[in-house]
Amino acid sequence: MKKISKRPESLKPVPFRFCAGCGHGLLHKFIAEIIDELGIREKTIGFAPVGCAVFAYDYFNFDVIESAHGRPPAVATAIKRLLPDRLVFTYQGDGDLAAIGTAEIIHAAARGENFSVIFVNNATYGMTGGQMAPTTLLGQKTTTTTKGRDKRMTGYPIKISEMLATLEGPSFICRTSLDSPKNVINTKKAIKKAFQYQLDKKGFSLVEVLSPCPTDWWMSPQEALPWMKKNMIPAFPLGVIKDKWEVGNGK
Amino acid sequence: MGKIVAVTGNEAVAEALRQINPDVCAAYPITPQTDMMQRFSSFVSDGKVDTELILVESEHSAMSACIGASAGGGRVATATSGPGLALMWEMLYVASGMRLPIVMPVVNRSLSAPLNIHGDHSDAMGARDSGWIQLWSENAQEAYDNTIQAFRIGEHMEIRLPVMVCLDGFIISHSIERMEYLDDNVVKAFVGEYKSLNPLLDIENPKSYGPLILPDLYMEYKRAQHEVMTKVKDVVLNVADDFEKLSKRKYGLFETYRLDDADIAIVILNSAAGTAKDVIDQFRAKGIKAGLLKPRLFRPFPYEEVADAIKNVKALCVMDRADSFGAYGPLFIELCGVALHLQERPLMINKIYGLGGRDFMPEHAELVLNELVEISKTGKVKTFKEYIGVRE
């Protein structure tokens, strides 16, 4: 019988330990598949974030570095400048990228550093147990906003991708979602494009992926996907937000 | 009076904060502290406190917000752990330099790299020179009691300094223990109404906080911080006396355990002291005069008082749950300072244990006490500093 599918070489043969319905496993698999497809496994350096994906080095079959919480864009800048022929990507959650590390991501993007960012937005601090994140939706209940996020107390969700797209530096910024088969396929395409841009020396690329966190949303995995479609996608619209190199798209 | 409960260390400290009802708290989650301020945020949501809770984007901002609130004239608290405390570093010195009585439980955790979330004293030891008062706690009861006393100590009009209350990550923060809560009205009466000193926006008396002070006067400010620290011991003891009257629980600058007639002794901080005390009982049962000293007030450090407490000990092991790489452990270095106050000092050894949450087991205390017996017999120390409970 013909073998049509196999575990990517860039993924170690170990089971994922993520919660049921979590998006990280899917994203890890895509990243590994893309790196295999691009044939650059031995030239890849990834980042393990502080957050639920902290164990990235247990899963990815390439070199991974851990940095202090929020600082991957600064460390990635230096690695990429030192080793410009490598594929360097950070993998950051909304706590890492949109809260504690806001300064680093803005300045790396503004400088147009030639590395890629996978920004996983699940609208909550997953690892610490579901506290309010900067991306938490208005009205969303978390362990620190138990009556729902109130804009008078905690302000509004940050749209990181739109914010970074106002800068001249970034080349490619796109938001995708893991809520449906179509959007899952688009997510993989977007990440591949981001990596290809980096390999083509086109500059800073970021893919924001809306990802389910049933555990900290207090839902079943089945309930989480429609919830994302109904609540998250309207607040964080999908699509290409900036593409410097696409014809008819500005510059 | 009071209530007997079974709670975790985090829950106990969150309860103390609820009873105290600070004006402002800033919170950013970090393991293993997270669940303390999360519990506190439930008190805010449920209207059980009037606190203005600010959910900030990092610990750097958490301490900055506390500084603003405290300079503005409010009673202020936050909490953190390990790398969170490290990210606050810059502001720790600002808080103490501005003489702002912020209270901060520190759920002790190791520092990266490698990344580790477990109990370890490297965080607070690194902050020992930041001008904060440090109280250390063996268990949930002590963490609760120290938190309540911390407000009285830091806010004392002759002190006005920030206070850290240290408790061991996971071992205490996440373990359920039997302990006693005081009644709300008792705690409220004990800490009293907050009295601000030189607050901002006092229109009749405008002020500046933290101005640029160059070599002409900077050193005088630092000398003043040193001077105020010399007054802290008396205040800590007075507050402890008042606290004993309402709680029947006695606190001092440190705790001694079977130390009065001890030939050999262990000096150790926080939760591991409990384990060591059990082993000391076993040695006492064998007729070996073993004792223990557990510092409570680590900054300022009570050198003379500790010297007096250990003056008859022949051999002493100072145990550090943190290392100062290339030097002796931080607690051991303090005991070297203590030795300056003794005509005859005990033979001293330093053991590093329990880093990154490695369990401190009774057999580790046994190992140490047996070595102390040997040292007191022979008068010889083989190795001054050694790791124990470590894979070779």
Image (spheres, rainbow, N blue to C red):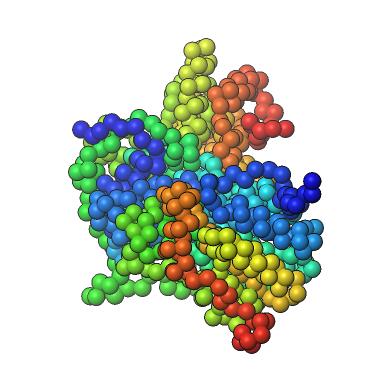
In this rendered view, identify the residue nearer to me: B373 or A135. A135
In this rendered view, identify the residue nearer to me: A43 or B326. A43
Query: Does residue B184 appear left or right of residue B353 in this picture?
Result: left
Image point (52%, 41%), residue name: B119
In this rendered view, identify the residue nearer to me: A219 or B259. A219
Question: Which residue is most to the front?
Answer: A1
In this rendered view, identify the residue nearer to me: B301 or A232. A232
Residue B202 vertical position relative to residue B85 in the rendered view, above or below: below
Image point (25%, 38%), residue name: B182
Q: Quadrant of residue B223?
A: bottom left
Q: Check the picture and name the quadrant holding the C terminus of chain B.
A: top right
Q: Quadrant of residue B2?
A: top left
Q: Position of residue A213 (x, y in %)?
A: 49, 53
Q: Report if residue B151 is visible in the image.
A: no
Q: Report if residue B195 is visible in the image.
A: yes
Residue A65 vertical position relative to residue B240 in the rendered view, above or below: below
Image point (54%, 80%), residue name: A166
Q: Position of residue B350 (x, y in %)?
A: 61, 34
Count of numbered badges drawn on the protein:
0
Q: Check the picture and name the quadrant holding the N terminus of chain B.
A: top left
Query: Does residue A174 appear left or right of residue B233 in this picture?
Result: right
Q: Position of residue B338 (x, y in %)?
A: 51, 39
Q: Position of residue B241 (x, y in %)?
A: 28, 38
Image point (67%, 70%), residue name: A194
